[in-house]
Structures are given as C-alpha cells and as structure tokens.
Amino acid sequence: MVLKLKNISVSYANKHILKNISTSFETGEIVMVIGANGSGKSTLLKVLAGLIDYAGEIILPEGINDVSEITGYVFQNPETQIIGSTVWEDVIFGLENIGLDKREMEIRANYVLNLLELAELKDADPYYLSGGQKQRLAIASILALQPEFLLLDEVTAMLDKNGKREVVDAVVKLKEAGKGIIIATHELNLFSPYSDRCIYIDNGAVVFDGNPSDGVKLYREKVHREFTSKAV
Ligand SMILES: Nc1ncnc2c1ncn2[C@@H]1O[C@H](COP(=O)(O)OP(=O)(O)O)[C@@H](O)[C@H]1O
Ligand SMILES: [Mg+2]
C-alpha cells in the first residue's frame, strides 16, 4: 500500500510550517524523519494522521476516503495515551470505541499483546510498567485498530536504554508484520541501521529523502556547522 503526498503545505497564521512537501510512504518500510526542533516533523506526522488542515494533496489507496483510516499516531509520552486500568483493558478500550464484537476484540488484543511481548502483563496495572513497556502498550493499543501505517513521534525520547531497545525491536517486528513505520526521531544512531529511508526536514522543507546513513551524515554536518559558527 502506498501513501503519496503532493505539495503539502501547512501554515499557522502567517507562518509557513511545512513547505511543498512531496514524498511517498509504503507499507513494509521504516522511514525516519529527522531535523532540528521546530523543523516540522510532528506537523508532518499530524498531516498523515489527519489531525490538521493542509494545502496540497494526499493520494490515498483505492477505497480509502480519509488518511486517518489507514494511519495511527503514537505520542512521545505514553502516559498521555494509556487509559485502561489494566494492559488488557487499555487495548480493548480503543476497540470498544469502533464497535467490534467481543470475539473480534479478543482476537485482536491477543494478537497485538503477543506481538509486542506484553501478553504476560495483560492483567498488570499500566501505572507500574517500565517506560519501554508503557510505550509498547501505547503502540499495541494503536496497532489493534489495524492501521497500515504507524506514525511514531519521538517515542523513545523519554525512555532509558533498555526501553529504547525494546521499542526498536518492536518497530522491526511491526515492519515484518507488513506495517509502514514513519518515525520522527532525534535518535539517529538508534534508528538509522533499521530504517529503509530517511527524510530530513529543515525549516519546513524536505532537504533530503533517501538513504538513512547519507541523510544522517548531512544532518550532522549542518548541526556541526551551526555549532562552530555560533562558537566563534
Ligand atoms: N498549533 C500550533 N500553532 C502555531 N504554531 C505551531 C503549532 N504547532 C507547531 N507550531 C510551530 O510549527 C513549527 C514546527 O513544529 P513541529 O512540527 O512541532 O516541529 P518538530 O516536531 O520538528 O519539533 C514550530 O515552529 C512550532 O512552533
Ligand atoms: Mg516534534
């Protein structure tokens, strides 16, 4: 499945936040979106989630009417996304909202909890989970809604080393399960070995779209240039 963006622009008041972004995303692919704070990474993910207005065109697969039907957004802080009083209930809660029957909900919940290695914690109170477990639960609950593309916004930023590792492993599993993963991140070393592509955004514009190691190198050179020019 392919999701295509054509000349996407976003403005708030008179400020141009995203400028003529054209690219595409495929299922079975991990794409890392990098760039400085405020460059527009989250805004791009929100466009893909159907959360904000934009100019330009999103070309959807046949039979899909709105981009939100095929995407699911996971936030940086899992606490804001977890609502169930047990791991199991958290996954079921989102499914009740889309009106599935009980049997179908259970099948889906078991599938996502197994995939994200949370099955043994299904009766646990999410409050007591580790950071990595919480983030995997947030991802599981979104995954249960069966999006084709997962939009992960700085999902490892608040985690310790183990938590980061757990989430990276989960992302690789999601790719193997055929999902498209679009991940906005500052953790260049963590994600670039597993990414198929890198989109580098600078001040709202895509300045690089291609091989992750080349994209990361370009970004590092720019950060380094800015740092040395400020130091003078
Ligand atoms: N709701 C909003 N209203 C006005 N400006 C916003 C809003 N959301 C984001 N911005 C601005 O858009 C720019 C890009 O933000 P964002 O997409 O969050 O960047 P990133 O995720 O790369 O840090 C920033 O300058 C930010 O201040
Ligand atoms: Mg952001």
Image (spheres, rainbow, N blue to C red):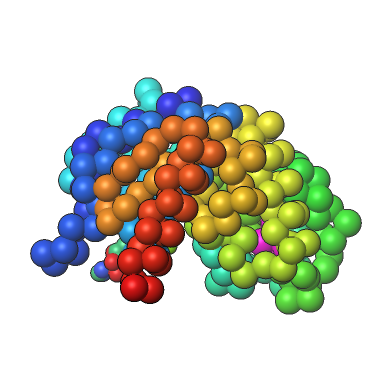
103 falls in the magenta region: no
The magenta stretch is 132-136
Q: How many marks?
A: 0
Inspect this view and state whether residue 50 appears. no
Q: Is residue 149 above or below residue 76?
A: above
Inspect this view and state whether residue 2 appears. yes
Q: Is residue 99 left or right of residue 122?
A: left
| Whole-percent x, y for residue 232 in the image | 34, 73
Q: Is residue 20 above or below residue 78?
A: above
| Whole-percent x, y for residue 218 in the image | 42, 45
Q: Nearer the viewer, residue 85 or 230?
A: 230
Question: How would you classify the magenta stretch by its main secondary structure?
Answer: helix
Tell me where residue 158 sits by quadrant. bottom right
Q: Is residue 39 left or right of residue 164?
A: left
Q: Is residue 118 above or below residue 85?
A: above
Going 18% across and 46% down the picture, which residue do you hit?
55
Q: Is residue 164 left or right of residue 121?
A: left
Going 61% across and 47% down the picture, which residue do you hit?
191
Q: Nearer the viewer, residue 83 or 25?
A: 25
| Whole-percent x, y for residue 156 in the image | 62, 61
Q: Is residue 144 left or right of residue 124?
A: left
User: Which residue occupies the extreme bottom position in the image?
Assistant: 127
Q: Nearer the viewer, residue 219 or 129?
A: 219
Tell me where residue 40 sits by quadrant. bottom left
Tell me where residue 57 sits by quadrant. top left
Q: Nearer the viewer, residue 174 or 71?
A: 174
Q: Is residue 55 above or below residue 24?
A: below
Going 64% across and 39% down the picture, which residue do you hit?
194
